[in-house]
Amino acid sequence: MKYFGECTTIEQVKSLYKQLAKTFHPDCGGDTAIMQEINLEYNLACRKILNEQHSLSEDEINNEANMSERYRQVIDKLIILPNINIEIIGNWIWVTGQTYEVRQQLKEVGLFYASRKVAWYYRAQEYRTATSNKTIDEIREKYGSQSVGKGSVKTIGHE
């Protein structure tokens, strides 16, 4: 694999994808053909890791790969928005920063606003939970966090 060959976990694949998308996504000045190649390899890398590291059935691998693909598509739409921070906390995508100007786009992508946390979030239907009174910092502490900025990845907890 050209891009994801060194990755050994799904989390590494997702983190590297976010970095590559910020560089190669056409809306960020990148090339469409390269981004399509990255997207294809992303899916293959996820399937490979799931197959190697987990004793999952073909249906379970397909479900995990499909969920991973949905998250990739959401991140793909978010990275082009200005002045926001994208963070993976557990199995949820959280968006903070100057979100007011792009709130309509966030809604269209499928994010919801958590007023107590002053943040937007995306989660797969499988991860729907009851309302939590925890702060965003408490959630980060419990599940760990991966945040991608221009040219760097910052990981907090649960490595």
Image: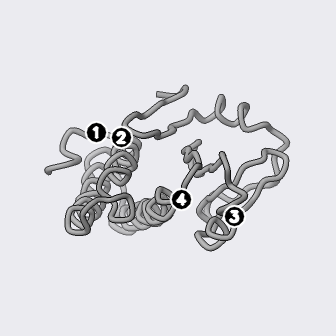
Q: Amino acid at mark 4?
A: Leu
Residue that numbered label 3 is attached to: 103
SS for callout 3: helix
Residue that numbered label 1 is attached to: 8
Please state the horizontal and vertical placement of residue 4, each as a whole percent of the image.
23, 47
Q: Residues within 10 Å of mark 2 (few under 14, many from 20)?
A: some
Q: CA distance from mark 1 to mark 4?
A: 29 Å
Q: Amino acid at mark 3?
A: Arg
Q: Are marks 2 and 4 in contact (CB under 8 Å)?
A: no
Q: Is residue 126 left or right of residue 151?
A: right
What number is the disc on residue 81?
A: 4
Q: Amino acid at mark 1?
A: Thr
Q: How is the image coloured?
A: one colour
Q: Residues within 10 Å of mark 4 (few under 14, many from 20)?
A: some
Q: CA distance from mark 2 to mark 1?
A: 7 Å
Q: CA distance from mark 3 to mark 1?
A: 35 Å
Earlier sequence position, callout 1 versus callout 4: 1
For the view shown, which residue lies furthest in the bottom direction?
108
Earlier sequence position, callout 3 versus callout 1: 1
